[in-house]
Image (cartoon, rainbow, N blue to C red):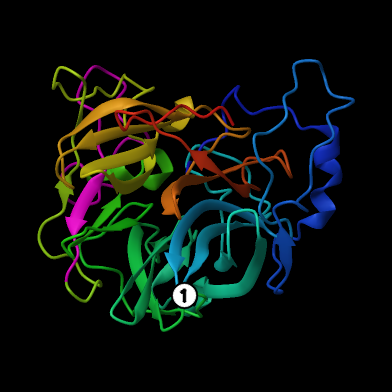
Amino acid sequence: MLTSSKSPRLAPVLAASLALLGACQSNSSTQETTTASDAPKADTTAAAPAAKQPLSQPLISNIYTADPSAHLFDGKIYIYPSHDIEAGIPENDKGDHFAMRDYHILSMDSIGGKVTDHGVGLDIKDIPWAGRQLWAPDAAFKAGTYYLYFPVKDKQDVFRIGVATSKTPAGPFKADPAPIAGSFSIDPAVFQDTDGSAYMYFGGLWGGQLQRWQKGTYDANAAEKEPSTDVPALNARVAKLSADMKHFDGPVKELVIVDETGKPLLASDTKRRFFEGGWMHKYQGKYYFSYSTGDTHLLVYATSSTPTGPFTYQGVIMEPVQGWTTHHSIVPIKDKWYIFYHDTQLSGKTWLRNIKVTELKRRADGGIETIVP
């Protein structure tokens, strides 16, 4: 969940995209469906010559959605996105204008097929310890139970990570009465390895508050942003999950990312360093940690022989999308790999986004080909 809007990257709004705003009721909880092929397509006939067609179309248009976490459950593709709303809060670098209050759960039988909105799967009012800002979630399944992991600010305005459970992938989910002990910051991503171990990756800079945890406890007086000098970058965090998938089984560790020479990436290396939106997947025995660079608007990745690193930076997965923020998930579906992501095609506003999907392609050596969205 990226947090700033002060960037020259925010693309101009296409005239036809503005006409689509009426199709998106940002606080809707009704169960509606749309299809990838029927999703609105921007008409660029009156646009400037430099305007480009988007690579793919929004998966759903009855609500605004972002930060899609996709999983294969019960033979279907389930997507757990953020639910963007028009909260009327001025934009700032802390992301206060991202004031989401619930999650809708989506599903589809296949890529390109009909998308079903199952309605609200979890509401902030049903999380006992929550204060505000229900940001990007993730999900997992184990032993008959589905788990929804979510970041939200507690009543002291500090981001923590909670967990909710359900017996069905579409919910509704019931939140545990307290956040996961030892959790902090944002963007939980849960990876279940082939040996049965499960890990949570999390963290985000600026409004995600990661820079305020450098001493091990929350420092309300810490800088609003990460260091900009040539010091090692602040990295994502990783913790092994307990057998019940509800607690950390051991200490929270830093997920170190290094360059091709083995040196840690620097805070000033803003086109490669971690900012937020981490995701882990495994391909041919190698671990791929992908993430957003934040204010440089790239999705990039690093690889390792272990799930906890260190990870070596490899390259760019996706160039900047329309809008400030970028957040994704990568999943295998049948014999192909896909990346779910978002942009602002429907609204032109960085806090009112729409999720999309496109194929992820690899080179013979396993490297990921760069996508131009």
> Where in the figure is residue 257, as x and y percent of width and height?
21, 32
Classify residue 115 by image quadrant.
Answer: bottom right
Q: Amino acid at mark 1?
A: Pro
Asked if residue 216 is among those painted magenta in the image, a careful observer would answer yes
Residue in front for this viewpoint, 57 or 48: 57
Classify residue 244 by image quadrant.
Answer: bottom left
Residue 221 visible in the snapshot:
no
Residue at 64% x, 34% y is 55
Residue at 57% x, 25% y is 7
* In the displayed structure image, the side of residue 234 where residue 138 appears, left or right: right
> Where in the figure is residue 133, as x and y percent of width and height?
50, 58
Please identify the residue farthest to the left as the structure is shown.
Answer: 250
Residue in front for this viewpoint, 337 or 96: 337
For label 1, the crowd category at 10 Å Cα-Cα, with few meaning under 14, some 14 to 19 and many 20 or more, is: many
* In the displayed structure image, the side of residue 310 where residue 365 appears, left or right: right
What span is colored magenta in the figure?
214-242
Residue at 32% x, 21% y is 228
- Tell me if residue 80 comes above or below residue 269 in the rendering: below
Count the numbered circles shown.
Answer: 1
- Tell me if residue 299 comes above or below residue 28 in the rendering: above
Residue in front for this viewpoint, 144 or 155: 144
Classify residue 199 by image quadrant.
Answer: bottom left
* In the displayed structure image, the side of residue 60 where residue 338 appears, left or right: left
Asked if residue 31 is among those painted magenta in the image, a careful observer would answer no
- Tell me if residue 311 comes above or below residue 282 in the rendering: above
Residue at 42% x, 51% y is 331
Quadrant in the picture for the C terminus: top right
The residue tagged with tag 1: helix, strand or loop?
loop
Label 1 sits on residue = 169
Residue 310 visible in the snapshot:
yes
The prevailing secondary structure element of the residues shown in magenta is: loop
> Where in the figure is residue 323, as x and y percent of width and height?
61, 34
